[in-house]
Amino acid sequence: MPSVTDGGTDGAALERGRKLMGLYRGGVGGERANAGRLLGAHLRTHDLTLFDLHPALPVTQDLSALDSFRESAALLSQLGTDGQDDALTALVDADDLTDPELRRLLGAVDLHKLVQARVDGWASLDGVDPQALAQAASSMTEADVLAGSGSLARRLRFAAARQLYRQTHPLRLIRTGSAVQSAFVRALLDTLSGHPSAERRDDQGALLGVEAHLSAPQLARARALIATFAAEADRRAAQAARDFGEELARRDAP
């Protein structure tokens, strides 16, 4: 079967095929079925295969091959080739990469250049100083970047913002005496700050409390809420435990 490399296929037919393929892959229900019929007919009419539309696809006119096709995986195959630069431009915003794929992408991306290209936009959206954000981003580790979710660019933005927040908000320790109190305090701090807190334990594993990066006003607000509602949190936790115990007992009763 002739292909694009055989010389007889014009650019208009290829472009039309790629548009129909995009409609088929992005469509649902009747729209997808209609695009599939048109695409199949187009391939047969012009003696094209899916390979002609994208080099990562097989030499076939069977549209079922598109069901497992991922553009991101195809782009990753171009790393280390002449097409790497164009592939990287698309891959940094791809939101369907697995963690191993993200690690591979990290090995090919110049994070400093990516930060410099995006930092002004991030800073404007977050209302922070771009130089401070860029400086914070320079101290990030790979683990910091991978801790987020979504595309590499989104993870990088999240990690930079978190790093800047840590640098501008002192680490505080709020002591707690039980797992229930720690859960209550962590929920308060996570919500007040918008950043995750963590339990701190001593060398023997004993609970010391909850630590979080907080400004002075955030710390004052947290302490006020804890002083006012800690007893109520304990009461609700105890009631929830009693209700759960009663539910289990009734479930197993003869």
Image (cartoon, rainbow, N blue to C red):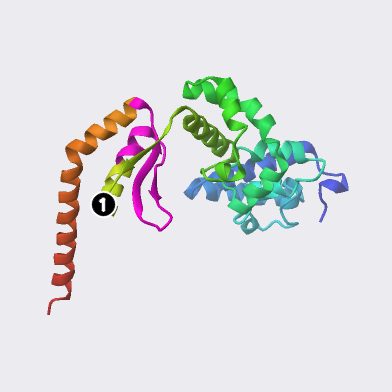
Task: Determine the residue positioned at 17% across, 65% down.
Answer: 245
Q: Nearer the viewer, residue 176 or 155?
A: 176
Please, what is the three-letter code of the amino acid marked with disc 1?
A: Val
Q: Quadrant of the N terminus?
A: bottom right
Residue 76: x %, y % from top left: 70, 48
Task: Determine the residue positioned at 26% across, 52% down.
Answer: 180
Magenta residues, as a range?
A: 188-216
Q: Quadrant of residue 206?
A: bottom left
Tell me, yes or no, whether the highlighted magenta stretch contains residue 49.
no
Q: Quadrant of residue 67?
A: bottom right
Asked whether, in this view, residue 225 is left or right of residue 58, the answer is left
Residue designated by label 1: 180
Please identify the residue farthest to the right as the structure is shown: 7
Q: How many marks?
A: 1
Asked whether, in this view, residue 100 is left or right of residue 124, the answer is right
Please identify the residue farthest to the bottom as the structure is shown: 254
Q: Nearer the viewer, residue 47 or 164?
A: 164
Q: Nearer the viewer, residue 79 or 136?
A: 136
Label 1: few (<14), some (14–19) or many (≥20) C-alpha neighbours in 10 Å: some
Q: Is residue 95 visible?
A: no
Residue 219: x %, y % from top left: 32, 31
Q: Is residue 50 visible?
A: yes
Tell me, yes or no, whether the highlighted magenta stretch contains residue 191.
yes
Task: Determine the residue positioned at 16% across, 45% down.
Answer: 231
Asked whether, in this view, residue 125 is left or right of residue 57, the answer is left
